[in-house]
Every structure is written in C-alpha cells, then in structure tokens.
Image (cartoon, coloured by chain):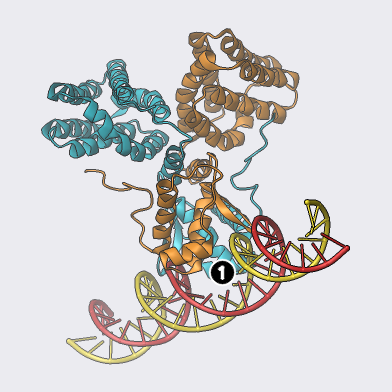
Chain colours: A orange, B cyan, C red, D yellow
Amino acid sequence: MVANRSMMPDETNPGLVSAAIQAITQYIRVEGLGPGDLLPSEADMTRRLSVSRTVVREAFRSLSAMRLIDMSAGRRASVAKLDIGAMSMVIEHGVTTEQISVHQVYDVRRTIEMRTVALAALRRSDAEAAEIQEYARLMRENYHAPEIVMEHDIAFHEAIARASHNPVFSLIITAFSGVTRRTWVIGWRTRASVEDQIKMIEGHADIARAIIAGNPQLAAEHMAAHFDKSVKALTDAGIA
Amino acid sequence: MVANRSMMPDETNPGLVSAAIQAITQYIRVEGLGPGDLLPSEADMTRRLSVSRTVVREAFRSLSAMRLIDMSAGRRASVAKLDIGAMSMVIEHGVTTEQISVHQVYDVRRTIEMRTVALAALRRSDAEAAEIQEYARLMRENYHAPEIVMEHDIAFHEAIARASHNPVFSLIITAFSGVTRRTWVIGWRTRASVEDQIKMIEGHADIARAIIAGNPQLAAEHMAAHFDKSVKALTDAGIA
DNA sequence: TGCCCTCAACCTGTATGACATGTTTTCTTG
DNA sequence: CAAGAAAACATGTCATACAGGTTGAGGGCA
C-alpha cells in the first residue's frame, strides 16, 4: 500500500544505461551546474563510469530526448534551459493511447488556468499585458481563418501562463498545447454560427481586459466561463 | 511573437535518432497501440527506417527513459502504461538547476490539490476513502519518526490525486513528490514543538474526514489551510 | 494423448573499432 | 600581431561480435 516506487527517477530500472543516466543527473546536481554549463565528453564519461561509449551515448541521448541536456555535433553536451521537454510527449502519449481523455485534460487546464489568469492579473508587466491583448486582437482579426485563430488562442493561453511568472504553470500549459491543437477545430465547428464564434473570441477579449485592469477575480470568472463553454462545445461534439 | 516552436515533440532536432523517435511514436499512433502492445523488434525497425541498429536503439532507449515504452532484455519493447515518466525528471531538473523555486512548486501543488481534494470528496470510492484515512492515521501513529511521517504524507496526497479519478492530476502530483522529499524535512523542523507537529498531522486528518464526508467545499478549505501553513513553514526556514 | 523438457531461434544488453563530420585550439606563416 | 591552416577533440552513424534473457517448436516420456 505504501508507495515506494520511483523514489528517485529511473532508479528502478536495472541496467548500465539507467545507472549512467542517474550518474549524469547526479553529476549536474553535485557540480551545481546551471543552464549552458558543459558536461564531460562522452569519452570522459566512459572512463569515469567504466562502461562502453554505447552506454554513455544512450544515457546522454535519453537526457537529450527529455530536454534536460542539449546535444549537437562536435560540441559537448550542455545543461538545458527549462523546456516542456518530455512533458508534452508524456501527455500526448497518454491521450493517443487512450489512457487520458480530452475532458480530463480540459479539467486540468481549467484548474490551472484559473490560477494563472489570476496571477497574471496581479503580476503581469505592461509588455505582457500588451502581448496578451494583442493575441486577443489577432483572434478577432482573423476570425474567418480557424487555424490562425487557433494558433493565437494557444499563444494567448501560453502568454497568460508566462505572465503568471511561475515557470511550472507555463511548463504544464505549454505541454498541453499539442493536445489542444488536435481537438481545437472540433470545438470550433460546433460553434455553428459566426455569432457564436465571435462570442468565443470576445470571451478572450474579456479575459485580456480583466488582466489589464488587474482584476484577478474577474479574470478568473471569465476564464472559468470560457472553459465551461469550451467543454460544452466538446461534449456537444461527442468527445468523451 | 507567435509561438511556432514545438508544434510536435522533438520535431526541431535534426538527426536520425530524433527522426526515429518520431517514427516510433507515430507508429504507436497509427497502429492504435495501447499499453502492453508490442512494438517491432530493433532489427525490424532497423529495416523499416533504413538506419543502423545504433540509431534505433538510441531512439528506443530515449522513449524508455521517458517511460513511453517498456524495455527489458530478451523481449520486445511494449507500449507503457501511463507513468510520471519524464515529468518528475523535468521538474527535478528545473529545481536542481535553480530554474524553478520550491515556492513555485508549492503554488502549483496548492492550485492542483485544491481541485483534486474537491474531486476526491465527490468521486472517491469507499476503498479510496479508507486508504486516504489510513495514511492520515499512519502519520499520527508515527509522529515521532519524521521520515515515516513524510512517506505517509506523500502517499496521502498521491492517494487523494488518484481518488480524483483524473490521471493527469495524479501524474502531476506524483511528479512533484521527488521535490517534496527534498524539502519536507525542512518544513517539519520549523515546527519546533510537538504540538505544532501534531497540529500539522491533524490537518491531514481534517482533510481525510472532509473527503469521507463527501464535502468538497470543506475539503478544499482544509487543503488550502494545510498548504498555507506549509508554505509559511518553508518561508520561516528561509526557503526562497 | 498429454505433459514436460530441451534446444533452437529470436531478442535485447553491452563492448569495440572505424570513419564521417562538426568544433575548438594551437601553431605556423605572412 | 593577425589570419589561416592543421591538429586535436567532439559527436553522429555504422558494422560486428558476443553474452544472456525469452519464447515457442519439437521431441521424448509417461
């Protein structure tokens, strides 16, 4: 009953590669490396860990796939800046293998974005406020071109997350963007009339205004309304 | 200004390995594979993609590191069940490289757990309710042994997330557990007196009772109070 | 017939060596 | 001293080899 799994990442897996992955992450920790700092070369690591280059490479490559480190030909690997990295892949994997439903993703987004929008209203810089408003404007301006609206919609939500000044929120929201891209059009299509589509876009403008006004309460309310409508649209379209 | 990065995971990276990773994930999608389903062997994939086994292996290994697939000696790789996988590593990486602060993690946890606790109050099965209560009881029973209390504390929160019946919440909360383990003791130590420590444990019991009573409002309030106290404890300890 | 055991076929795990290509450092030369 | 060439170093990819785990086919035995 007690959860003793995954005390540390990957510790459970046997094999030299997992050990190497741990050794490398531990190296980063112990050496106190930050983004951009260089790691030892593969040859170096081969000697340190007394394993073949094959193993070291698979370890490096794994960390690279998770975007914990950056690799490129000719130069040594370096510690990566924070990136959605593997997170989006995990989410996408969950959705495509039907272990996660779109509704569940939306519930999480709603929960988080009601917070990010409130934080954004409190913390946004003027530049961030302008950016958010700009995306809302671009949505309105391109209301006849769904895919452009979608991209601005996604950018809108990501910009709000950024304005919350908490990178973890930003990380999670961005990780969901891929899933959003796959379902957005469906929601759009259920808004049969142009009026409905405009209304949805105006919902974004409402949110933007509340953020600019620095009113977290109102911003959260608009965000909640927005999500409720989006979920309803998906439900109407028969998305479980 | 427009976000055109990371439309699809990894698409930006050049190189055969990234291409192979994409090919494999696409294979899973196209073939409609679910957890447990087998993937082609490395030799097979080598032929399909016309690349060396080295490349295929690095791709497989990367997916394995993200826990999107399971690998083990002798048997072919299979599609993995949903797992925190890389998510915890991304978070840990962010924290250890000081790109994410502990406070930011706690804000996210608070946001999410106020929702999971409410959902748990509404949706929990009797077994789940019993499990949650049991962890609270175990915390009280072992109040003199911090590390045991911590493990039950973490298990308590994870159980609530599970009882929300939304795997995405569960995923995210579990991903944070590693970070929690590294800071939990600090918060505990700031609770100088045994009374304070007991009070903290009783906070968990309050949450459990509200879940059992099926009162989402109350459960959320207790959870909020719990987090506020935890954050205060960390602040008192000088954790930025 | 039915069960169990063995072994062959297949699979992944790891190591080694080789070579192409990209990057950095060093040294030579003008 | 500066510019450019070459050497040293790094990663990217391939081929091969073999150890060890897994599975299923086939044969032997009851």
Above or below, B180 relative to A130: below
Secondary element under disc 1, as helix, strand or loop, is helix
- Identify the residue at horizontal 37%, vertical 24% (top origin): B110
Residue A206: image location, x then y, percent: 60, 11
On the image, numbered disc 1 is attached to which residue? B53
Q: In the figure, residue A23 lies in which quadrant?
A: bottom left
Above or below, A107 relative to B131: above
Q: Is residue A239 visible?
A: no
In the image, taking residue B141 as reference, residue B178 lies left or right, namely right
Residue B77: image location, x then y, percent: 45, 61
Above or below, B145 relative to D21: above
Above or below, A84 relative to D7: above
Q: Quadrant of the N terminus of chain B?
A: top right
Which of B102/A107 is in front?
B102
Q: Is residue A70 visible?
A: yes
Residue A142: image location, x then y, percent: 75, 22
Label 1 is placed on what type of residue? Arg
- Identify the residue at horizontal 31%, vertical 46% (top origin): A7
Q: Quadrant of the C terminus of chain B?
A: top left
Which of A213/A233 is in front?
A213
Residue B18: image location, x then y, percent: 60, 55
In the image, taking residue B118 as reference, residue A74 lies left or right, namely right
- Identify the residue at horizontal 62%, vertical 66% (top origin): B48
